[in-house]
């Protein structure tokens, strides 16, 4: 009789240990997933800040005589495309993140071309409104870079945990998937091509 109680007690102890391991792994994954979603929301906020600055920048630049209308149109269209894509951090799929990143990259490239073209307009660069907007935009781009780095760091920690034993078993059981990283856009290492011929 005493042996059966010891066996039952051992089984209960092992089951309790398994439940504690699964519960701890699950709770840790939930916490890290929330960190990833928070970082993605912060990044989205920085992208929104940039999108909010662009109409002011475009209207200030429009004041320059004979400014390249095509460049302004490209920036306006890229902004419209980028703001059409909304990300729900709690339900973001790798495909949605890739589409979001591509739209934001196209907007970055269009802004880069706009700022490069403005170098040919000294009267525009001399206006206080343009200088202020340019400084705000540069600051926003720096914030975006930091927010992307922060997102990638928490995503890396989460992805590592999702793939590490024994947590990977819990992740598979409860549907915790990896998050893709934000990467530099193809061609981002090249300066915008501006031709004044």
Image (tube, rainbow, N blue to C red):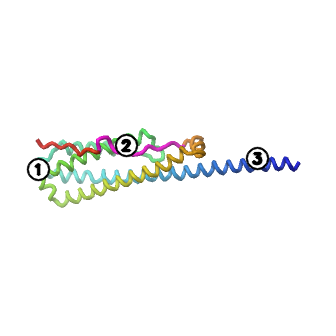
Disc sitting over residue 100 in the figure? 2
Badge 1 crowding class, 10 Å Cα cut-off, few under 14, some 14 to 19, many 20 or more, is few
Which element carries disc 1, helix, strand or loop? loop
Which sits earlier in the primary sequence, circle 3 or circle 1? 3
Q: Which mark is residue 11?
A: 3
Residue in view at x 44 percent, y 51 percent: 153
Q: For marks 2 and 1, give the one nearer the viewer.
A: 2
Q: Position of residue 154 (x, y in %)?
A: 46, 52
* Identity of the residue drawn at 76% across and 47% down: 11
Q: Do the residues bearing badges 3 and 1 touch, measured as CB atoms within 8 Å?
A: no
Stretch of the chain drawn in magenta: 176-188
Query: Main SS of the magenta segment?
Result: loop
Q: Residues within 10 Å of mark 3 (few under 14, many from 20)?
A: few
Can you give x and y, in whole percent of width and height, for residue 109 in the image? 27, 45
What quarter of the picture does the C terminus occupy?
top left
Per the model, the C-alpha gap separating discs 3 and 1 is: 83 Å
- In the rendered structure, which disc, 2 or 1, sits on the residue that comes first in sequence? 1
Q: Position of residue 148 (x, y in %)?
A: 38, 51
Query: How far across and how far down the image is residue 15, in percent?
Result: 72, 47
């Amino acid at each position: 009789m005493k042996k059966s109680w010891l066996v039952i007690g051992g089984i209960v102890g092992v089951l309790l240990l398994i439940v504690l391991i699964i519960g701890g792994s699950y709770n840790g994954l939930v916490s890290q997933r929330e960190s990833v979603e928070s970082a993605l929301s912060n990044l989205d906020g920085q992208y929104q800040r940039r999108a909010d600055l662009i109409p002011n920048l475009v209207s200030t630049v429009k004041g320059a005589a004979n400014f390249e209308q095509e460049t302004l149109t490209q920036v306006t269209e890229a902004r419209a495309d980028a703001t059409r894509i909304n990300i729900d951090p709690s339900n973001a799929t790798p495909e949605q993140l890739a589409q979001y990143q591509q739209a934001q990259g196209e907007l970055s490239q269009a802004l880069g071309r706009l700022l490069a073209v403005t170098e040919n307009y000294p009267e525009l660069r001399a206006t206080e409104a343009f200088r202020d907007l340019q400084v705000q935009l540069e600051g926003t781009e720096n914030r975006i870079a930091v927010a992307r780095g922060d997102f990638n760091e928490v995503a890396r920690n989460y992805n590592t945990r999702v793939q590490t034993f024994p947590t990977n078993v819990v992740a598979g059981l409860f549907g915790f998937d990896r998050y893709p990283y934000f990467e530099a856009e193809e061609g981002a290492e090249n300066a915008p091509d501006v031709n004044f011929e």
